[in-house]
Amino acid sequence: MSFTDQSSYLSQDIGECDPEIAALLRAEAERQTQTLEMIASENFTSHAVMQAAGSPLTNKYAEGLPGKRYYGGCEVVDQVEELAIARAKQLFGADHVNVQPHSGATANEAAYMALLKPGDRVLAMALAHGGHLTHGLKVNFSGRLYEFHHYGVRREDCRIDMDQVRELARETRPALIVAGASAYPRIIDFPAFREIADEVGARFMVDMAHIAGLVAAGVHPTPVGIADVVTTTIHKTLGGTRGGMVLSNAEHGTAVDRAVFPGLQGGPLMHIIAGKAVALGHALTEEFRDRQRHVVANCAAMAEELVAGGLNLVSGGTDNHLVLVDLSDTPLTGVDGEHRLEMAGITVNKNGVPFDERPPTVTSGLRIGTAALTTRGLREPELREIGRIIASALKPETSEADLADLRARSNAISERFPLYPHLTAGSVVA
Ligand SMILES: *Cc1c(COP(=O)(O)O)cnc(C)c1O
């Protein structure tokens, strides 16, 4: 690190004052460009979002809410946060929105804190069947603070077992029922959950972290207006800056706001809220809606090729942005599969499948999503080719030499779809 004087401390380019980190930023931009990114929870955010997230708003303390802050000098960031809230309300038709949660996990903490007391019972989807660690994993805050019970999917078709949800709801009388998943390839029936929640006198919360972009575009039915509280990330299918958000009906708005601050967080990340505002504004455009339709069409096209190539998919296919490949009947584990696809130039994650007999560190599945590549511009012909590459890579007899050939095919696709050209060409930050 080298700073020549006080003025250069404030204005020096990172390439000059911290070449070590600058080189890593460039290396990561190159890695993202050269591989096919298919981790279902990831996406590529826009240059504009990164400009907001890299802005001097990072300097501002703004504890409280717009117009009701504990710090001076908030007149500009108030407008930024108000715009983010207004855009989110318009996008999802919500009565109340809090855009301050630092992440999806924090949004869930806030929702629980608003709706529950420690020790209350909650019914949510099992992690092993596609749920999320904030839905009651024992070592997570959720599992430590609340008494979680879990429903799952049916063995026959791997769809959420609504009969089991009803039975468990009647048995456990939860204060809250949670719907939403991290690895579920099908449409979730929110009205059916609401009916069960009403029957047992529970509140209903939806965690739409994965599918928020699809919901915003009307490609997945919306939980807004059905659930009492809806939580989400901004950075998955919604494609914005990393962070979370809580939508709610008017009744729970104040409780949600108090849970976020002072319940859980101190100062909000105003630069990130600016990034959320930019992303939410973009999500209101026809370009965004059209792209979400392509996310789903691309995933369906890839799924067809995977099945044609002899792979089993959990539930037999997909309605959304992801598939779960089930390797249980093959000699390969999820770890093997992830490694092979990496050698073939495709980044995915190993993932448990419902009723998996292998441990979570090994697994028998792969979760593969199309949101990031669709944002990058890929369409059905490319996703079909990628489906064929994946199916070939996962054939037991495929050799290292074959994987190198497959990587050349992946690279040929990457090269046709530039990503952040200005970043790999020398400039390091937005
Ligand atoms: C990703 C995810 C979260 C958590 O989001 P983070 O921003 O990683 O904390 C919560 N719930 C579900 C269902 C998710 O998929």
Image (spheres, grey):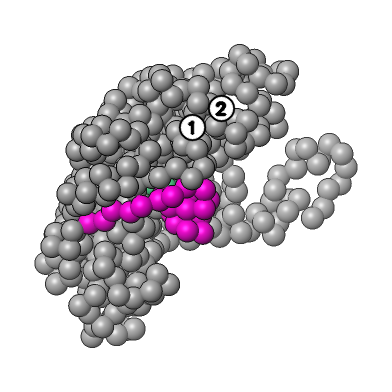
Name the image quarter holding residue 400: bottom left
Name the image quarter holding residue 365: bottom left
For the C terminus, the image quarter is top right
Q: Nearer the viewer, residue 198 or 66?
A: 198
Circle 1 sits on which residue?
A: 114
Q: Given the current orientation, which residue lies at the most extreme right position?
A: 5
Residue 82 rendering spot, x and y as whole percentages: 51, 19
Q: Amino acid at mark 1?
A: Ala
Q: Is residue 137 magenta?
A: yes
For the N terminus, the image quarter is bottom right
Q: Is residue 308 above or below residue 149?
A: below
- On the question of residue 242 being in view, the answer is no
User: Element under label 1?
Assistant: helix
Q: Is residue 152 magenta?
A: yes
Q: Nearer the viewer, residue 157 or 308?
A: 157
Circle 2 sits on which residue?
A: 258
Q: Amino acid at mark 2?
A: Arg
The numbered mark at residue 105 is: none
Q: Answer yes or no: disc 1 within 8 Å of ligand 1.
A: no
Q: Is residue 92 above or below residue 356?
A: above
N-terminal-most mark, 1 or 2: 1
Cβ–Cβ under 8 Å for marks 1 and 2: yes
284 horizontally vs 193: left or right: right
Q: Residue at x 46, y 23 (%)?
A: 253
Mark 1, Cα crowd under 10 Å, few <14 / some 14-19 / many 20+, is many
Residue 351 rendering spot, x and y as whole percentages: 35, 65
Q: Residue at x 69, y 28 (%)?
A: 61
Mark 2, Cα crowd under 10 Å, few <14 / some 14-19 / many 20+, is some
The residue range painted magenta reads: 133-153
- On the question of residue 365 being in view, the answer is yes
Residue 364 rendering spot, x and y as whole percentages: 30, 72
